[in-house]
Amino acid sequence: MNRLLTKSRKLPLTLGAMALGVAPLLQAGSPALTGLVAQADNAESAFAAPAGMSRLDGTHITVQTMYITSLADFEVDQDETTISGGDPDKGTDPMIIPSIYYVRQFSDRWHGGLSLTVPSGFGSDYGGTWSGRYETVDFSLVYVALTPAVSYRVNDQLSLGVAMGINYTAEDSEVKIPQPGAERDGKITSDLDGVGVNVTLSLLYEFTDRTRAGIAWTSDSDADLEGNVRLRNLEPGFDKIATELGIKNINTEITNTLPQRMLAGVYHEFNSGNYFTVDGMWMKFSDFSVSNIKLNGNDVNVSVPEIYNDIYAGTVGMGFPANERLTYKIGAMYVSKAVDDEDRTFSIRLDRMWGVGAGVSYVLNNGNTVDLNANVINVGDASVDQPSIGGQVVGENDDPWAVMMELTYHLH
């Protein structure tokens, strides 16, 4: 029973936390996810740093699509792993992230905005026969964020902004469970969803027409996820026991606290028209927690190990206008480890990341702009040495790289 509680708690929520935690980095239409806060030259400001909307005249709409695919495969260390099955199938499906942003100027001082960000196709399918099948087989996560925002220009230099994120998360996952004496494994599946709310406060200060800096703080968010955890493919004897215990279909309620984060950035344009951006993010991921667990309406006390680190990220970008229409862009990024190597499990198999990117921005005849960016990201070895049912699973990423392509259309 304790194993069932652990599985129902662990797999869905850590993945959802990471998706929500790094979402501001993903919503950046520049190489290597640069220009997050202070560049503030399009409708994307409505999401991560709404004070930047004060720089926009009239109405702006941005439509964006990102495509991310992993080249990494998890390779099981056969000498150290004591469970049969070997390597998984290729573990990570492509990730497609469509987003739309809208900003409207109400007056010289007031702007309103709305963003809808929909990361979809985020998940893994390791297969049901590999060595780590008792830790994870597959999962999928859909995260939808609707974020209304407003900004106010205090004076020529200072602007303030506030946004409210309404965050919906839906999760499906599967793990195998051994059945002693049986020819096949059983499985545990979960299907949970819920809504959480957070608030973003931001500030943008324009020192000159060419230099500005900004900061944005986002509160934590408590999402009450509800759904079912089910036992399936059980042998007759085990099926009878599970039915009598009432654990074949468990109504599950969990509160997932997603920690606060802070973004800060600087933008400067040289006399030549070239510019650079520097951005940083801090997320208090050490406060990630799961609480208020209920199974079939009964409170369950499950201790959550304090293994997570605060996350730090940084990006640096530069732009080089070739003429009035065409601008070339480059960038680099770094994201720290969410968990140390010795504490990493399959529920949050993330390592430090770094990446580089390049792109172009082109102004069309109608005045609208198209951005195209390509990024290569090293996702780290993400090694795991984890006890599992019946033994140990050890391994790491082979070819730890991911490719991100991004296409954005800005309507002015």
Image (cartoon, rainbow, N blue to C red):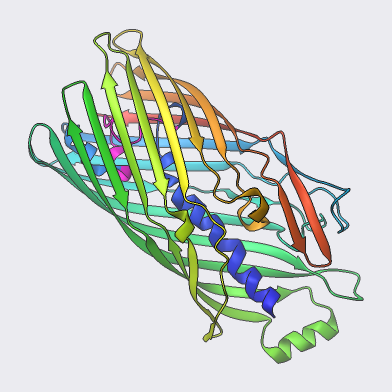
Residue 247 placed where, x, y %? Answer: 67, 83
The quadrant in which residue 272 appears is top left
Residue 168 placed where, x, y %? Answer: 42, 60
Which residue is pictured at 52% across the width and 30% down the height? 405
Count of labels shown? 0
Residue 371 placed where, x, y %? Answer: 40, 24
In the rendered structure, which segment of residues is drawn in magenta?
33-48
Q: Is residue 364 above or below residue 300?
A: above
Residue 308 visible: yes
The quadrant in which residue 14 appears is bottom right
Residue 56 visible: no
Q: Is residue 137 above or below residue 302?
A: above
| Quadrant placement of the C terminus | top left
Q: Is residue 345 above or below residue 116?
A: below
Quick one: which residue is furthest to the bottom in this view? 244
Name the foreground residue: 389 vs 170. Answer: 389
Residue 207 placed where, x, y %? Answer: 16, 27
Name the foreground residue: 228 vs 45. Answer: 45
Query: Principal SS element in the magenta part?
Result: loop
Which residue is pictured at 65% across the width and 69% down the height? 7
Name the foreground residue: 359 vs 310. Answer: 310
Name the foreground residue: 102 vs 135. Answer: 135
Which residue is pictured at 26% across the width and 13% down the height? 270
Residue 300 relative to residue 5: left or right: left
| Quadrant placement of the N terminus | bottom right
Residue 29 painted magenta: no
Q: Is residue 352 above or below residue 405?
A: below
The quadrant in which residue 28 appears is top left
Residue 44 relative to residue 156: left or right: right
